[in-house]
Image: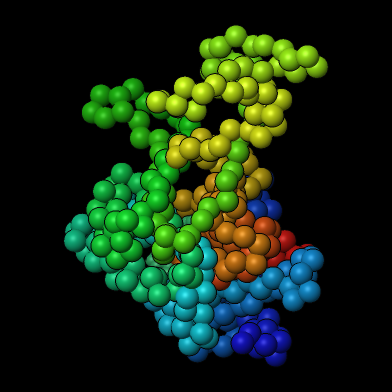
Amino acid sequence: MLNSSMNNNLHKQIKFRHDKAKGHQRYSCAKPRQKCSFVRQDFPRIRILTNKKSSSPSHVPCIIIQNTALDQLIWLSQKGLTGRFQLIYWDPPFFSGKQRTAINGSFNDQWSSLQEYLNFIKEHLVQFVPFLAPTGFFVLHCDYHASHYLKILGDELLGYDNFRNDIIWHYSGRRQKAVVRVNSKHDSLLIWAKSDEARMNPIFDKWDRDYYVRMKKQPVHRDEEGREWIWGHKGKGQSKAYRIYLEEVVAQGRAIDSVWDIPIINTSARERVGYPTQKPLKLMERVVSLLTQPGDWVLDVMAGSGTTGVAAWSLKRPVCLGDSNPEAVAITLARLKQLIT
Ligand SMILES: C[S@@+](CC[C@H](N)C(=O)[O-])C[C@H]1O[C@@H](n2cnc3c(N)ncnc32)[C@H](O)[C@@H]1O
């Protein structure tokens, strides 16, 4: 489907300048003020990379498209990729009412009304659904501006019963004295499955013995071999007690819950590429690891700086990324190319 001549033809379509300035990497189009210089100006504007570092014999492909999300989806359906994606991650504008600007890019998040914004969301949601694999997951990243409306729209299209989690991504940052409302320091990642069959990969956080013992508030015993254990119970109504060996629970770690404490990218972080609302790689690695296996296709049609792509591709997932903003596509391409050179 994506043969090598297509790959070669597409290979030189974009030129980049890649400077370093003040600790930031600066990404821009080759010709300032002109949109990224694609050789082919016809629809759609596409780059295809393969990760040569991959141990997979067929290499892991990465498709990058500069176009509107809806036009990207038309192209994907023409290429027979409907029903193919195990993970569709969508991080659209949040209805913040702002022009989002940073050193290497900007995009508009201003709307004439809430209704206009919700129409935009709904129009896209409807189109995404056919691209999900039968066991796939859809993740909608949003915040307090509209999350309560988006949950309802998602339930209507993907099914209330298919809703799996409202993940709270909690982050730190500068706080101000709260008079009107307290500091808002979280985003929501709303997760729906395509069907009952969809399964996540369990993820565990590290914890140590002392933390676990403090939490359990129980005496620690030692067996004949000196191994530490405490009493465990199967839960209410099931009185049968059993031994929990501390070395085993510590080695396994603690199953994650729906609140994820992951720092935002600080101003001097190497990871920061200067695109507004760039998400931390750690967050996206967790999303990808939780919801996909190596080899599963991942889709992000509003990829911004391409964080989903960096996470997915590094974890050996084939990925399709896109954005209508040439600044975003330039950054995404440069970040992805760094993974193969
Ligand atoms: C919140 S940002 C995504 C940030 C990204 N997750 C990251 O880590 O950098 C939303 C992106 O949607 C893009 N966008 C907005 N409307 C679009 C449309 N109709 N088609 C494609 N991209 C669009 C914007 O250009 C912007 O880059």
Determine whether, in the image, residue 268 is placed left or right of residue 121: right
Q: Residue at x 30, y 24 (%)?
A: 178
| Quadrant in the picture for residue 208 | top right
329 sits left or right of 13 in the view: left
Q: Quadrant of residue 224?
A: top right
Residue drawn where x is 57% and y is 51% of the image: 201
Taking the spot 22% from the left edge, 64% from the top edge, the residue there is 116
Identify whether 3 is placed above or below 57: below
Residue furthest to the top: 219
* Residue 123 as seen in the image, left or right of residue 245: left
> Taking 249 as reference, is 291 above or below it?
below
Query: In front here: 277 or 215?
Result: 215
Q: Nearest the camera: 123 or 327?
A: 123
How many numbered callouts? 0
Query: In this view of the protein, can residue 105 be seen by the observer?
Result: no
* Picture quarter with ligand 1: bottom left
Q: Is residue 256 visible?
A: yes
